[in-house]
Amino acid sequence: MERISEEDVDCFLQQMEQLSAAVPVIEKRQEEWRHCQDFCIWVPEVFQRTDREKAEEIFWSEQLPDAVFINEDNTAGITLQRLETAEALISMAEIRQLLEKLDDRIVFYDSGMETEGIKVHWLEYKSFAADVRVYNVLFVFGAGEKEILGTFYCIFEEYEQWKPVIWEIMQTIKEEYKHEGT
């Protein structure tokens, strides 16, 4: 199979849409804020936290993310997991290289850093699972003394619907400090 370059039609279409798209305002309700150790994050109510059994159906790995949220029809999801110290030293460039080694069909669209709130480094790409194209945003941020790895994924045909949502999610991440005795 031929390697797809960044001159791929999907990449061009996404760049054009990004330039012309208006940023929607998304209402956030109190019950949609998820409070985790050292941080909180807004996760829309359409994403429900799954149990381990359901997560094992989605991820064929022994190392499951700490938290998995999926939508009702299982076409989109968000994962969060704490990185061990050695993993936290990996840069987005190194993550990209690892992904390229795993599957040379991956199409990378963009990478960068969100600076509203805490710094969130991100990498946007398209991958392939069985016979389905998958839109992905991988993001890393610091919370307390840990680094957190987050991923967002959806079937590629739905990325236009979800892309503004994942950007909003990344911009809502806030550190929360726990005091002794609380």
Image (spheres, rainbow, N blue to C red):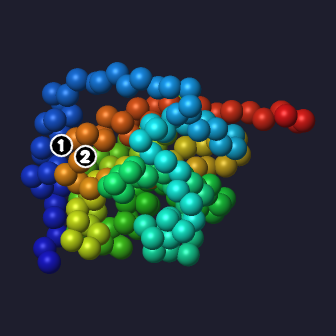
Mark 2 lies on residue: 159
40 lies left or right of 107? right
Return the x and y of residue 12 as percentages of the image width and height: 12, 45
What residue is rendered at 49% in x and 48% in y? 48
Going by the numbered disc 1, the residue's amino acid type is Gln
Q: Secondary structure at mark 2?
A: helix
In which quarter of the view is residue 41 placed?
top right
On residue 14, which mark appears?
1
Going by the numbered disc 2, the residue's amino acid type is Tyr
Q: Are marks 2 and 1 in contact (CB under 8 Å)?
A: yes
Return the x and y of residue 117 as percentages of the image width and height: 53, 27
Is there any visible trace of residue 13 in the rendered image?
yes
What residue is rendered at 74% in x and 33% in y? 177
Crowdedness near tag 1: few (<14), some (14–19) or many (≥20) residues, C-alpha within 10 Å:
some
Crowdedness near tag 2: few (<14), some (14–19) or many (≥20) residues, C-alpha within 10 Å:
some
Return the x and y of residue 99 as percentages of the image width and height: 37, 66
Vertical position of residue 44 compared to residue 58: above or below: above
Is there any visible trace of residue 150 in the rendered image?
no
Point out the image quarter for the N terminus: bottom left
Q: Secondary structure at mark 1?
A: helix
| Viewer-nearest of discs 2 and 1 | 2
On residue 118, which mark appears?
none
Return the x and y of residue 54 as percentages of the image width and height: 49, 65
Q: Earlier in the sequence, mark 2 or mark 1?
A: 1
163 lies left or right of 120? left
